[in-house]
Amino acid sequence: MGAQICFPVEYLPLEEARSLFKKTAGDSMEENLELRPIAIQVVEECEGLPIAIVTIAKALKDETVAVWKNALEQLRSCAPTNIRAVDKKVYSCLEWSYTHLKGDDVKSLFLLCGMLSYGDISLDLLLRYGMGLDLFDRIDSLERARNRLLALSVVREVARAIASKDPHPFVVREDVGLEEWSETDESKRCAFISLHCKAVHDLPQELVWPELQFFLLQNNNPLLNIPNTFFEGMKKLKVLDLSRMHFTTLPSSLDSLANLRTLRLDGCKLGDIALIGKLTKLEVLSLMGSTIQQLPNEMSR
Protein backbone atom coordinates (compact mmCIF):
# COMPACT_ATOMS: atom_id res chain seq x y z
CA MET A 1 0.00 0.00 0.00
CA GLY A 2 3.03 2.26 -0.12
CA ALA A 3 3.32 2.82 3.64
CA GLN A 4 6.78 3.94 4.74
CA ILE A 5 6.44 2.63 8.29
CA CYS A 6 4.46 -0.49 9.24
CA PHE A 7 3.18 -0.96 12.78
CA PRO A 8 2.09 -4.44 13.91
CA VAL A 9 -1.51 -4.63 15.09
CA GLU A 10 -1.48 -6.22 18.53
CA TYR A 11 -4.06 -8.70 19.79
CA LEU A 12 -6.45 -7.01 22.20
CA PRO A 13 -6.97 -8.24 25.76
CA LEU A 14 -10.43 -9.70 26.27
CA GLU A 15 -11.88 -6.67 28.05
CA GLU A 16 -10.63 -4.29 25.35
CA ALA A 17 -11.95 -6.64 22.67
CA ARG A 18 -15.38 -6.65 24.30
CA SER A 19 -15.34 -2.86 24.58
CA LEU A 20 -14.46 -2.45 20.89
CA PHE A 21 -17.11 -4.97 19.88
CA LYS A 22 -19.79 -3.25 21.97
CA LYS A 23 -18.84 0.18 20.62
CA THR A 24 -19.10 -1.10 17.05
CA ALA A 25 -22.20 -3.29 17.40
CA GLY A 26 -24.18 -0.80 19.47
CA ASP A 27 -26.16 -1.21 22.67
CA SER A 28 -28.36 -4.08 21.49
CA MET A 29 -25.95 -6.70 22.83
CA GLU A 30 -26.31 -5.24 26.32
CA GLU A 31 -30.03 -4.55 26.21
CA ASN A 32 -31.04 -8.01 24.95
CA LEU A 33 -30.50 -10.56 27.74
CA GLU A 34 -30.71 -13.48 25.30
CA LEU A 35 -28.13 -11.88 23.04
CA ARG A 36 -25.55 -10.99 25.68
CA PRO A 37 -24.03 -14.47 26.28
CA ILE A 38 -23.90 -15.13 22.53
CA ALA A 39 -22.14 -11.81 21.97
CA ILE A 40 -19.53 -12.65 24.60
CA GLN A 41 -18.79 -15.95 22.84
CA VAL A 42 -18.59 -14.24 19.43
CA VAL A 43 -16.02 -11.81 20.83
CA GLU A 44 -13.98 -14.72 22.18
CA GLU A 45 -14.02 -16.37 18.75
CA CYS A 46 -12.47 -13.22 17.25
CA GLU A 47 -9.39 -13.98 19.38
CA GLY A 48 -8.55 -10.33 20.01
CA LEU A 49 -8.01 -9.51 16.33
CA PRO A 50 -9.23 -5.92 15.77
CA ILE A 51 -10.12 -6.43 12.09
CA ALA A 52 -12.15 -9.53 12.97
CA ILE A 53 -13.90 -7.77 15.86
CA VAL A 54 -14.88 -4.71 13.82
CA THR A 55 -15.93 -6.72 10.75
CA ILE A 56 -18.20 -9.09 12.68
CA ALA A 57 -19.62 -6.38 14.94
CA LYS A 58 -20.61 -4.21 11.97
CA ALA A 59 -22.22 -7.15 10.22
CA LEU A 60 -24.20 -8.23 13.30
CA LYS A 61 -25.38 -4.79 14.35
CA ASP A 62 -29.21 -4.75 14.63
CA GLU A 63 -29.48 -8.40 13.54
CA THR A 64 -31.71 -11.04 15.16
CA VAL A 65 -30.60 -13.54 17.79
CA ALA A 66 -30.84 -16.29 15.15
CA VAL A 67 -28.31 -14.50 12.96
CA TRP A 68 -25.96 -14.05 15.91
CA LYS A 69 -26.20 -17.77 16.74
CA ASN A 70 -25.49 -18.67 13.12
CA ALA A 71 -22.44 -16.41 13.11
CA LEU A 72 -21.11 -18.06 16.26
CA GLU A 73 -21.52 -21.55 14.77
CA GLN A 74 -19.73 -20.57 11.56
CA LEU A 75 -16.86 -18.90 13.40
CA ARG A 76 -16.35 -22.04 15.49
CA SER A 77 -16.23 -24.25 12.41
CA CYS A 78 -13.91 -22.08 10.33
CA ALA A 79 -11.81 -23.92 7.76
CA PRO A 80 -8.07 -23.30 7.47
CA THR A 81 -6.86 -21.07 4.66
CA ASN A 82 -3.75 -21.30 2.52
CA ILE A 83 -3.57 -17.56 1.88
CA ARG A 84 -0.15 -16.36 2.95
CA ALA A 85 -0.15 -13.93 5.87
CA VAL A 86 -3.91 -14.22 6.43
CA ASP A 87 -4.89 -15.57 9.81
CA LYS A 88 -7.54 -18.29 9.48
CA LYS A 89 -9.77 -16.53 12.00
CA VAL A 90 -9.53 -13.28 10.03
CA TYR A 91 -10.42 -15.20 6.87
CA SER A 92 -13.38 -16.84 8.59
CA CYS A 93 -14.70 -13.51 9.89
CA LEU A 94 -14.37 -11.77 6.54
CA GLU A 95 -15.90 -14.68 4.65
CA TRP A 96 -18.85 -14.75 7.03
CA SER A 97 -19.29 -11.00 6.62
CA TYR A 98 -19.27 -11.44 2.83
CA THR A 99 -21.91 -14.19 2.86
CA HIS A 100 -24.20 -11.91 4.86
CA LEU A 101 -23.96 -8.93 2.55
CA LYS A 102 -27.52 -8.15 1.56
CA GLY A 103 -27.95 -8.57 -2.18
CA ASP A 104 -26.01 -10.23 -4.98
CA ASP A 105 -25.22 -6.78 -6.38
CA VAL A 106 -23.24 -5.80 -3.28
CA LYS A 107 -21.49 -9.17 -3.17
CA SER A 108 -20.42 -8.88 -6.79
CA LEU A 109 -19.14 -5.35 -6.25
CA PHE A 110 -17.18 -6.50 -3.20
CA LEU A 111 -15.51 -9.25 -5.24
CA LEU A 112 -14.89 -6.80 -8.06
CA CYS A 113 -13.12 -4.47 -5.64
CA GLY A 114 -10.82 -7.34 -4.72
CA MET A 115 -9.59 -7.46 -8.31
CA LEU A 116 -8.63 -3.79 -8.40
CA SER A 117 -5.54 -2.01 -7.17
CA TYR A 118 -6.23 0.05 -4.04
CA GLY A 119 -5.87 3.36 -5.86
CA ASP A 120 -8.50 2.29 -8.40
CA ILE A 121 -11.31 1.69 -5.91
CA SER A 122 -13.22 4.88 -6.63
CA LEU A 123 -16.98 5.24 -6.63
CA ASP A 124 -16.87 6.74 -10.12
CA LEU A 125 -15.06 3.72 -11.53
CA LEU A 126 -17.28 1.25 -9.70
CA LEU A 127 -20.29 3.14 -11.03
CA ARG A 128 -19.09 2.66 -14.61
CA TYR A 129 -18.33 -1.00 -14.09
CA GLY A 130 -21.54 -1.61 -12.15
CA MET A 131 -23.74 0.01 -14.78
CA GLY A 132 -22.19 -2.19 -17.43
CA LEU A 133 -22.74 -5.33 -15.37
CA ASP A 134 -26.21 -4.26 -14.18
CA LEU A 135 -25.16 -5.07 -10.64
CA PHE A 136 -27.20 -2.68 -8.56
CA ASP A 137 -30.57 -1.02 -8.25
CA ARG A 138 -29.47 1.72 -5.86
CA ILE A 139 -26.37 3.88 -5.84
CA ASP A 140 -25.76 3.21 -2.12
CA SER A 141 -24.84 -0.37 -3.06
CA LEU A 142 -21.53 1.02 -4.30
CA GLU A 143 -20.70 2.73 -1.01
CA ARG A 144 -21.63 -0.33 1.05
CA ALA A 145 -19.54 -2.68 -1.08
CA ARG A 146 -16.51 -0.41 -1.04
CA ASN A 147 -16.79 0.21 2.69
CA ARG A 148 -16.78 -3.53 3.36
CA LEU A 149 -13.55 -3.81 1.42
CA LEU A 150 -11.89 -1.19 3.67
CA ALA A 151 -8.38 -0.06 2.74
CA LEU A 152 -6.54 -3.18 3.80
CA SER A 153 -4.64 -5.55 1.54
CA VAL A 154 -5.63 -8.50 3.72
CA VAL A 155 -9.30 -7.85 2.91
CA ARG A 156 -8.54 -7.76 -0.81
CA GLU A 157 -6.68 -11.07 -0.49
CA VAL A 158 -9.72 -12.63 1.16
CA ALA A 159 -12.00 -11.12 -1.48
CA ARG A 160 -9.86 -12.67 -4.20
CA ALA A 161 -9.87 -16.05 -2.45
CA ILE A 162 -13.67 -15.99 -2.16
CA ALA A 163 -13.96 -14.84 -5.76
CA SER A 164 -11.85 -17.74 -7.02
CA LYS A 165 -14.42 -20.17 -5.57
CA ASP A 166 -17.42 -18.41 -7.11
CA PRO A 167 -19.45 -20.54 -9.58
CA HIS A 168 -18.33 -18.07 -12.27
CA PRO A 169 -14.89 -17.18 -10.91
CA PHE A 170 -13.26 -13.79 -10.63
CA VAL A 171 -9.57 -14.18 -11.57
CA VAL A 172 -6.55 -11.88 -11.30
CA ARG A 173 -3.97 -13.24 -13.72
CA GLU A 174 -0.51 -12.29 -14.97
CA ASP A 175 0.44 -12.75 -18.62
CA VAL A 176 3.00 -15.50 -17.89
CA GLY A 177 1.65 -18.77 -19.30
CA LEU A 178 -1.46 -16.99 -20.57
CA GLU A 179 -1.98 -19.07 -23.71
CA GLU A 180 -1.72 -22.36 -21.80
CA TRP A 181 -4.04 -21.16 -19.03
CA SER A 182 -6.57 -19.84 -21.54
CA GLU A 183 -7.20 -23.43 -22.66
CA THR A 184 -8.09 -24.68 -19.16
CA ASP A 185 -11.58 -25.41 -17.89
CA GLU A 186 -11.09 -22.76 -15.18
CA SER A 187 -10.60 -20.00 -17.75
CA LYS A 188 -13.65 -21.15 -19.71
CA ARG A 189 -15.82 -20.66 -16.60
CA CYS A 190 -14.48 -17.23 -15.67
CA ALA A 191 -16.92 -14.33 -15.66
CA PHE A 192 -14.46 -11.68 -14.41
CA ILE A 193 -10.79 -11.48 -15.41
CA SER A 194 -8.17 -8.87 -14.54
CA LEU A 195 -5.09 -9.49 -16.70
CA HIS A 196 -1.75 -7.94 -15.69
CA CYS A 197 0.47 -7.57 -18.77
CA LYS A 198 4.09 -7.13 -17.74
CA ALA A 199 6.29 -9.34 -19.89
CA VAL A 200 4.63 -9.58 -23.31
CA HIS A 201 4.37 -7.23 -26.28
CA ASP A 202 1.82 -9.28 -28.23
CA LEU A 203 -1.32 -10.96 -26.94
CA PRO A 204 -2.67 -14.23 -28.40
CA GLN A 205 -4.71 -13.99 -31.60
CA GLU A 206 -7.85 -15.06 -29.75
CA LEU A 207 -8.87 -16.06 -26.24
CA VAL A 208 -12.03 -18.17 -26.09
CA TRP A 209 -13.69 -17.22 -22.82
CA PRO A 210 -17.40 -17.91 -23.43
CA GLU A 211 -18.65 -16.88 -19.96
CA LEU A 212 -16.58 -13.70 -19.62
CA GLN A 213 -18.57 -10.57 -18.70
CA PHE A 214 -15.81 -8.31 -17.35
CA PHE A 215 -12.29 -7.89 -18.74
CA LEU A 216 -9.74 -5.48 -17.26
CA LEU A 217 -6.38 -5.23 -19.02
CA GLN A 218 -3.90 -3.76 -16.52
CA ASN A 219 -1.01 -2.81 -18.75
CA ASN A 220 2.30 -0.99 -18.28
CA ASN A 221 3.14 -1.04 -21.98
CA PRO A 222 1.00 1.37 -24.02
CA LEU A 223 2.34 -0.18 -27.25
CA LEU A 224 1.08 -3.66 -26.38
CA ASN A 225 -0.37 -5.20 -29.53
CA ILE A 226 -3.96 -6.46 -29.35
CA PRO A 227 -4.69 -8.61 -32.45
CA ASN A 228 -7.78 -7.82 -34.51
CA THR A 229 -9.33 -11.21 -33.68
CA PHE A 230 -8.60 -11.04 -29.93
CA PHE A 231 -12.17 -10.47 -28.69
CA GLU A 232 -14.02 -12.92 -30.96
CA GLY A 233 -14.30 -15.55 -28.22
CA MET A 234 -15.85 -13.23 -25.62
CA LYS A 235 -19.43 -12.90 -26.86
CA LYS A 236 -20.94 -12.27 -23.40
CA LEU A 237 -18.57 -9.42 -22.51
CA LYS A 238 -20.36 -6.46 -20.87
CA VAL A 239 -17.48 -4.41 -19.46
CA LEU A 240 -14.11 -3.83 -21.15
CA ASP A 241 -11.29 -1.69 -19.74
CA LEU A 242 -8.34 -0.99 -22.06
CA SER A 243 -7.02 2.14 -20.36
CA ARG A 244 -3.55 3.57 -21.01
CA MET A 245 -3.16 2.04 -24.48
CA HIS A 246 -2.17 3.43 -27.89
CA PHE A 247 -4.50 2.55 -30.79
CA THR A 248 -4.12 3.71 -34.37
CA THR A 249 -7.32 1.76 -34.98
CA LEU A 250 -9.29 -0.31 -32.51
CA PRO A 251 -9.19 -4.12 -32.86
CA SER A 252 -11.83 -5.07 -35.43
CA SER A 253 -13.23 -7.86 -33.23
CA LEU A 254 -14.67 -5.18 -30.92
CA ASP A 255 -17.70 -5.06 -33.19
CA SER A 256 -18.46 -8.68 -32.25
CA LEU A 257 -19.13 -7.60 -28.64
CA ALA A 258 -22.87 -7.22 -29.08
CA ASN A 259 -23.51 -7.16 -25.31
CA LEU A 260 -20.87 -4.57 -24.38
CA ARG A 261 -22.32 -1.86 -22.12
CA THR A 262 -19.24 -0.19 -20.62
CA LEU A 263 -16.02 0.63 -22.49
CA ARG A 264 -13.22 2.41 -20.61
CA LEU A 265 -10.42 3.93 -22.68
CA ASP A 266 -8.99 6.38 -20.14
CA GLY A 267 -5.50 7.77 -20.74
CA CYS A 268 -5.31 6.37 -24.27
CA LYS A 269 -3.87 7.75 -27.50
CA LEU A 270 -6.61 7.06 -30.01
CA GLY A 271 -6.76 7.30 -33.77
CA ASP A 272 -9.77 5.97 -35.64
CA ILE A 273 -12.47 4.90 -33.17
CA ALA A 274 -15.37 4.72 -35.64
CA LEU A 275 -15.83 1.09 -34.60
CA ILE A 276 -17.34 2.24 -31.30
CA GLY A 277 -20.38 3.46 -33.21
CA LYS A 278 -21.28 -0.17 -33.96
CA LEU A 279 -21.62 -1.06 -30.27
CA THR A 280 -25.39 -0.63 -30.11
CA LYS A 281 -25.79 -1.59 -26.42
CA LEU A 282 -23.00 0.68 -25.18
CA GLU A 283 -24.19 2.85 -22.28
CA VAL A 284 -20.93 4.06 -20.72
CA LEU A 285 -17.94 5.26 -22.76
CA SER A 286 -15.10 6.72 -20.66
CA LEU A 287 -12.34 8.66 -22.43
CA MET A 288 -10.88 10.61 -19.49
CA GLY A 289 -7.40 11.92 -20.25
CA SER A 290 -7.36 10.45 -23.75
CA THR A 291 -6.30 12.16 -26.96
CA ILE A 292 -8.93 11.66 -29.63
CA GLN A 293 -9.37 12.93 -33.18
CA GLN A 294 -13.09 12.46 -33.76
CA LEU A 295 -16.07 10.77 -32.15
CA PRO A 296 -18.10 8.33 -34.26
CA ASN A 297 -21.04 9.90 -36.11
CA GLU A 298 -23.42 7.43 -34.43
CA MET A 299 -22.76 9.04 -31.04
CA SER A 300 -24.40 12.29 -32.11
CA ARG A 301 -27.75 10.61 -32.73
Image (tube, grey):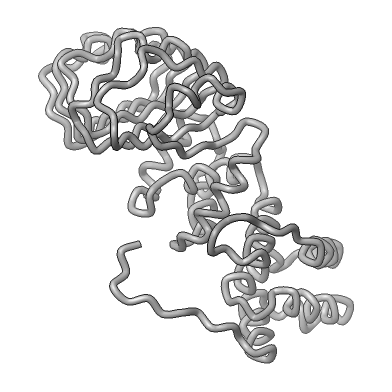
Q: Looking at the image, which residue is at 57% across and 41% down?
A: 108
Q: Looking at the image, which residue is at 59% across and 48% down?
A: 161
The number of callouts visible is 0
Residue 78 vs residue 265, the one in the foreground: 78
Q: Which quarter of the rendering shows the C terminus?
A: top left
Question: In this image, 16 relative to 271: left or right?
Answer: right
Residue 113 coordinates in the image, percent (x, y):
47, 47
Seen in the picture, residue 103 relative to 276 is either above or below; the reply is below
Q: Quadrant of residue 232?
A: top left
Q: Looking at the image, which residue is at 75% across and 79% down?
A: 44
| Residue 162 visible here | yes
Residue 25 coordinates in the image, percent (x, y):
67, 74
Residue 293 vs residue 199, the one in the foreground: 199
Question: In this image, 253 relative to 134: left or right?
Answer: left
Q: Which quarter of the rendering shows the N terminus?
A: bottom left
Residue 256 coordinates in the image, percent (x, y):
41, 8
Q: Quadrant of residue 289?
A: top left
| Residue 277 visible here | no
Q: Quadrant of residue 300?
A: top left
Question: In this image, 218 relative to 248: left or right?
Answer: right
Residue 165 coordinates in the image, percent (x, y):
65, 40
